[in-house]
Amino acid sequence: MSFRLSRAALTLALLSSTGVAMAADPVFNRVAAFPVAANLPADKDAKTVTSAEIVTASTDGKVLIYSDSPLGGIGFIDIADAKAPKPLGALTLRGEPTSVAVAGTKVLAAVNTSESKAKPSGFLATVDLATRKIENQCDLGGQPDSVAVAKDESFAAIAIENERDEEVNDGALPQMPAGYLVILPLKNGVADCAGLKKVDVTGLAEIAPEDPEPEFVSINDAGEIALTLQENNHIIIIDGKTAKVTGHFSAGSVDLAGIDTKTDGKLDFSGKQEKRLREPDSIKWLGNDRLVVANEGDWKGGARGFTIFSKDGKVLYENGAEFEHAVARMGHYPEKRSKAKGIEPEGLEVATFGDQRYIFVLAERASVVGVYKDTGAEPQLVQILPSGISPEGAVAIPGRNLLATANEADLIEDGGARSHVMLYELAAGEAAYPTLVSRDKDGQIIGWGALGALTGDPEKAGTLYAASDSVYSMQPSIFKIDATKKPAEITDVIRITREGQAAQKLDIEGLTTDGKGGFWLASEGDSAKLVPHALYQVDAKGAIKKEIGLPAELLAGETRFGFEGITRIGEGDNETLWMAVQREWKDDPKGTVKLVSYTPKTKEWAAVRYPLDKTEEGWVGLSELAVKGDSLYVLERDNQIGDKAKIKKLYRVALSELKGAKLGSELPLVRKLEVHDFLPELKAGNGYVVDKIEGFAFDAAGKAFAVTDNDGVDDSSGETFFFPVELKTTN
């Protein structure tokens, strides 16, 4: 697939989102996010780790059921009102649920009870959906992974993986016992244990044929079962009625180009990987004669995209790195996975809405869902949806125009986001996401993320600049943004250099123009990492011209949380830089932080104190400064997410208040006036509220904009929200 096709696919998606070319086409938008922890049993601590992994739906589409491995159970969600999902509780099972499927009024849950990888075991539980009680369970003889139900509900197929131990022999195969497939007859949705059939799939794969490791199953309308052997890089077709293998073929390999292959603190899409084994995870039928697989990889491979095969193994379409390219342009590329498997497409769903069949591709590490139209030939990318962290499974409910994703990562132990089930609705309108994308430059993708600073172009309305922080430590950058586009578009990038090389030891958290075509940067230091608290002046090409360290009087009270925002007041000899210190330093009275000034002409430092809002949980600090008219605007936020997020606000301080005193002396306390609450905008995406709204600026016409920091997609959903801001009228 050519690079041009990738760009064309993304352009099509963006045209769809703006309504320019495809106004008649409905779009998917997120309508709700359900935190899985809301289903915790009453006797569990609220901070108990939970996880939504595989999700399915009742036949009427009003209840979602998901597997929750850490909790050891399955959860239920009432989605009668899809925009207001309600918890229905969880059923604890005696083991680790790995997958769920619905057959009529019953839920089939595959449960792993293995003593160890060498001694695998598990069972299939039949649960009544109405009473949520176990009706029976069938011993499967090994560790189950995926379960699927035939369209006529006459049988279920379960992949028995008996997965390898990555700590044994460096994870190499073979590692016995071998995996296999189980077929169980169903009677009114209940598994008939006595009718269990074990399908031997040894001796078929080219890689470790004696040790197949089945991963995922799918069943077509004809009752044929498609089974992936992920580590074995193989696909098998089985007749569900006779339990006979009717075909099999290698998943093959892909030559990848234009990809980031190094985990090195920068985004560089010039690498390649040749003969990369696909090692597919999920598999879905497209009708009865074609198959689509998500090439996540697990052992030696991972082809970063998805492939469509004919039933006899012919490659009908290869996505290669095209999906990954589109994801990178949205700021969702997970740089820390570059050396391994990139965005890791893992989950799949296929469903027909109206007359259109869609393929939904879940990228685990990028935390997005690619929405493709199945054209019968090359699929057409129409949208990329934001998901929670690490989407694992999805279920479509075409009868209600709904899609649900299960997002497995729960970061409660690190104070991060919980696991969520996300709901999307297909309806007329415009796509709400993405809000910011990048345009290619000189035929190369502009990768971006972690935007922690924002400033406006002083002359051109609608043009702004944003800087990435230390996530990309080997590629500090300033991005030019055209905010007149929808979504807004990154059109250019300026790399920050020192003596011709990428500048190191920077954590750019503040950005403002210098009146000379260049910029002033505020770098947040961290002495433990030998990163200095400092100011830098760079020219229009990004070359550092001045490096200004902080004075001893200021550094005497330093902590890790330094400058988070810089703005400039005045011109020439009257130029003064103002910087916000994010949190209290050692010499600050509790509940106050410093606004620090520096005058380049005289090299004098001064400061005032700024009063922080109070919070009941976590901390509150400053993230950005901007000047307009006779006021300094201060972005203040807490570090909380979701329902706990309370303080994401913008305050105004009169410039007349900025009468800085000498460092080390008694500093005056400024007064502030609230002019905007960002919570409504942060809730508008119908996900959970992100904590890091870190950029705010005015353009040359005085229009305000804000942007969030996505942490470089590391332990984050990767979502970036860039939006215009309507401020309160103040006297």
Image (tube, rainbow, N blue to C red):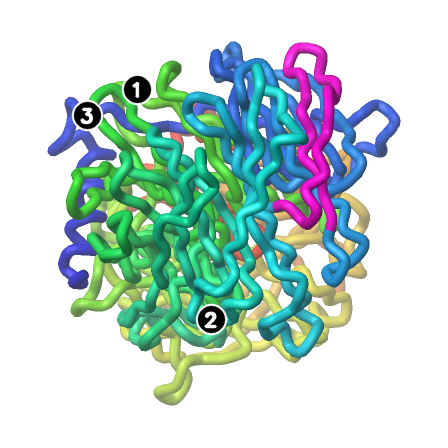
Quadrant of the image for the N terminus?
A: bottom left
Nearest-to-viewer mark from 1 and 2: 2
657 horizontally vs 609: left or right: left
Q: Which mark is residue 25?
A: 3
Q: Which amino acid does label 3 sit on?
A: Asp
Residue 107 occupies which quadrant of the picture? top right
404 horizontally vs 313: left or right: right
Q: How far apart are marks 1 and 3 (CA)?
A: 9 Å
Query: Mark 3 vs mark 2: which is more N-terminal?
Result: 3
Furthest-right residue in this view: 43
Query: Which region is colored magenta?
Result: 121-144
Residue at 34% across / 59% down in the picture?
249
Q: What residue type is labelled 1?
A: Ala
Q: Name the residue beneath numbered marker 2.
A: 207
Residue at 28% across / 72% down in the picture?
255
Residue at 64% across / 77% down in the picture?
170
Q: Distance between the residues labelled 1 and 2?
A: 45 Å
Q: Report whether residue 1 is seen.
A: yes
Q: Report whether residue 567 is seen.
A: no
Are there few (<14), some (14-19), or many (20+) residues within 10 Å of tag 3? some
Q: Where is residue 338 in the image (x, y as percent from the top left)?
A: 45, 69
Query: Mark 1 vs mark 3: which is more N-terminal?
Result: 3
Q: Which of 293 and 338 lies nearest the eye of the viewer?
A: 293
Q: How far apart are marks 3 and 2 (CA)?
A: 44 Å
Give the secondary structure at mark 1: strand
Give the secondary structure at mark 2: loop
Residue 219 occupies which quadrant of the picture? top left
Q: Where is residue 701 in the image (x, y as percent from the top left)?
A: 26, 40
